[in-house]
Amino acid sequence: MSAIPPTAQLTPAHQAALEWFASHSGQEVTWPAPLNGMFLMNRAKGIHKPAGLKYALSVRQSLNGPYKDSVQRLPGNLWRLQYAQEGLNATSFTNEALHACMQDRIPVGVILQVSEAPTPRYAVLGLGLVIRWERGVFEIQELLEPIASDLSIAVGLPTDAFDPTSNEDARARTQRSIALRQGQPAFRSALLNAYERTCAVTGCNVIQTLEAAHILPYRGDHTNHVQNGLLLRADVHTLFDLHLLDVDPDSFVIRVNAEIVDTTYAGLGGRQLRLPKQTQNWPSQEALRQRLQQRG
């Protein structure tokens, strides 16, 4: 992957606005005030392109909006947003601004509405890269390691020179990366306790491989609830996020998709989900049901 263009392409106000989204990632906020004279979101449009900028600054998903946007949780609890273009004209100025972000690999802030009037609130997902556009839908994926000072991003191979003397620092970075993949610490800790440090599907008890999986996508702190989660081994988390493996909401029996019935994972189908001892920690049957409905 190519590197982010030099920050000389971004105005100081644009860069500061992107840093706001990075620093507020994972938080719930009310409508944000302008920053350095620049609005962070647009009340009239989901795609916000500030006047005078080539690029979009942010995208906003609204509750009960006209578009079927969706957030998918990837392995490691990273997010990916399927975000519909504005209207039917792919060359409208807002859509063009998102295309420019995709072309030049400029990040955008991503924010989701989580409550309505009288006091709307929004979950800040953080910064994302527009990685593709197809049939009127932009795909925006979470940035792994935005660095606020220069917006450098580690999204592929290292771009700096290899330093063989920095092994200790490399180990620290590895531990931070593993922590990111495993999910928000408090959410994962609650699931580890509820499921007694054992994968709910496989019975694996190697704690380093266990991740916090959301049943319904993250939409703010309230969705980091033990009843909206499963403790899964990393590879099973991937299958779950891709709907190659699901859980029957009535019987808690594991289902496998036809795409993997000829693989080593076929044996997981028909198993009973390992439930927590405390019934108040069992996965929400309604959340599992909504998940299947959303898959269609």
Image: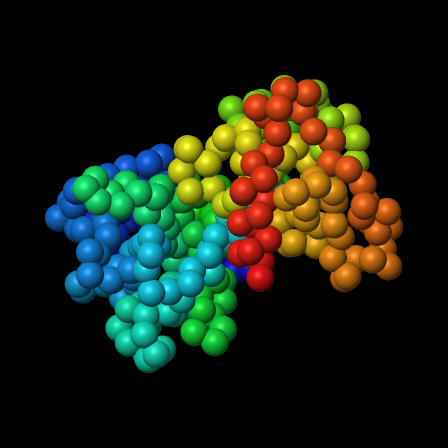
On the question of residue 95 being in view, the answer is yes
Q: Is residue 89 left or right of residue 212?
A: left
Image mark count: 0
Closest to the observer, 99 or 63: 63
In the picture as drawn, the residue positioned furthest to the front comes out as 250
* Residue at horizontal 70 percent and vertical 54 percent from the top: 244
For residue 85, what is the image quadrant?
A: bottom left
Of the 4 image quadrants, the one containing the C terminus is bottom right
Give the residue at x 48% y 32%.
Answer: 224
- Coloration mode: rainbow
For the N terminus, the quadrant is bottom right
> Percent from the top left, x then y, of residue 264?
86, 50
In the rendered image, residue 213, in percent from the top left (x then y), is placed at: 60, 38
**Residue located 59% across and 53% down the image:** 292
List the single residue furthest toward the left: 37
Q: Nearer the viewer, residue 296 or 84?
A: 296
- Residue 284: give x, y in percent of width and height: 56, 36
Above or below — where is 86 with respect to 199?
below
**Visible in this render: residue 60?**
no
Report x, y in % for residue 266: 84, 51
Question: 50 and 173: which one is in front?
Answer: 50
Residue visible at 39% across and 58% down in the picture = 106
In the picture, measured across the screen, residue 132 lies left or right of residue 61, that is right
Q: Quadrant of residue 166?
A: top right
